[in-house]
Amino acid sequence: MYTPGRIIYFDPFYFKNGASARSKYFLVLKVIGNVTVLASLPSSKYHLPASLDIDHGCIEIPDGCVNCYVFKNGQIITKCGFSFELDTFLYGQWLDEYDLENLKDKYQVEGIEYKIIGELLEDELQKVINCFTASAVVKRKFKRLLAQSPL
């Protein structure tokens, strides 16, 4: 279930910081030693400068401490033809690690607690990873993990 490039929809997703649980997409970027999942929680919330023109792909604004990968609405991003209905943002500063056993314990029933949306197109996944590994904003620890082979 937790393979790099897989988009999973959790309903609800239980946040590590104790925030109220809600439905959330989850993009697996890397599985580390079958113990930890490095992931991004895609957001439809726009946290970029208002004057910025948004295109599909990587946005890096070092002076503003901003790193983001944008999935434009309607753009097919998975092998099964999935696209987000809204512009969707992966913020580099929000990458996080999740304990694999904890995820498996919380989300056991596919179709009820979670749904596998699909796998990112290979070139799309590589662009996301390149965006984060080249960023001045993403934590060095995460950049090192993403740069390791294999995905």
Image (cartoon, rainbow, N blue to C red):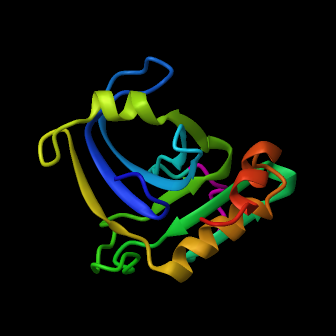
From the image, give the main secondary structure of the stretch colored magenta.
Answer: loop
Residue 46, how many percent across, how many down? Answer: 52, 52
**Left or right of 52, for residue 23:** left
Is residue 51 shown in magenta?
yes
Question: Which of 43/123 is in front?
Answer: 123
Left or right: 25, with 126 as reference point: left
User: Quadrant of residue 95 in the image?
Assistant: top right
> Which is nearer the eye, 79 or 68?
79
From the top left corner, tell me how far across and down residue 120 is, in percent: 43, 72
The outermost residue toward the front is 33
Residue at the image position 33 percent from the left and 35 percent from the top: 104
**Is residue 65 found left or right of 40 in the rendered image?**
right
Quadrant where the C terminus sits is bottom right
- Residue 53 visible: no
> Which residue occupies 34% across, 80% down?
79
Horizontal and vertical percent position of residue 138: 75, 49
- Residue 27 colored magenta? no
- Specify the segment rendered in magenta: 47-54
Which of 57 and 114 lies nearest the eye of the viewer? 114
Which residue is found at the position 47% from the left and 46% from the top? 41
137 with respect to 89 (left or right): right
Furthest toward the top, the residue is 18
Q: Position of residue 54 (x, y in %)?
A: 58, 71
Q: Is residue 70 above or below residue 18?
A: below
Seen at 51% across and 79% down, the residue is 122
Is 72 situated above or below 42? below
Q: Residue furthest left?
A: 112
Q: Is residue 82 visible?
A: yes
Q: Is residue 19 above or below residue 121?
A: above
